Image (tube, rainbow, N blue to C red):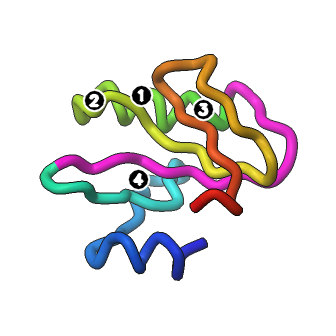
Amino acid sequence: MFLRLREMDAVLTFWRVGRQEVDFIFHVQDVAFPVECKTGRLRSSDTRLIRSLSEKWGVPFSVMVTFDTFDFSDPSILRVPAFML
């Protein structure tokens, strides 16, 4: 996943404070989107951090890369399967 995202964003980074972490911070122009990668069952705790970071940073949504879920039902988190990247 890192290599594919790195092809699209040369300044791809990660975010970590204490035990909280976000897998990637993806930059598009001057906007930094939190990106979390999950392969198993999604829990509410998986989305809480990236949702709060999106609100704090003022970005319209965050991205969750999943194994096979494509879902727009929650406008604050775009769920995209890895094969679509």
34 drawn magenta: yes
Q: Residue at x 57, y 19 (%)?
A: 74
Secondary-structure class at tag 2: helix
Mark closest to the chain's N terminus, 2 or 4 = 4
Q: CA distance from mark 3 to mark 4?
A: 16 Å
Disc 4 marks which amino acid? Val
Q: Quadrant of residue 52?
A: top left
In which quadrant will I find the N terminus?
bottom right
The CA distance from mark 1 to mark 4 is 14 Å
Q: Residue furthest right?
A: 41
Could you tell whether 32 is left or right of 20 in the image?
Answer: left
Front in this rendered view, residue 70 or 2: 70
| Figure check: 82 above or below 11 | above
Magenta segment boundaries in residue numbering: 31-44
Three-letter amino acid code at the position of disc 3: Thr
The residue pinned by badge 3 equals 47
Q: Which residue is mark 2?
A: 56
Residue 64 coordinates in the image, percent (x, y): 59, 44
**Dot 2 and dot 1 residues touching (CB under 8 Å):** yes
Q: CA distance from mark 2 to mark 4?
A: 15 Å
Res. 17 mark = 4
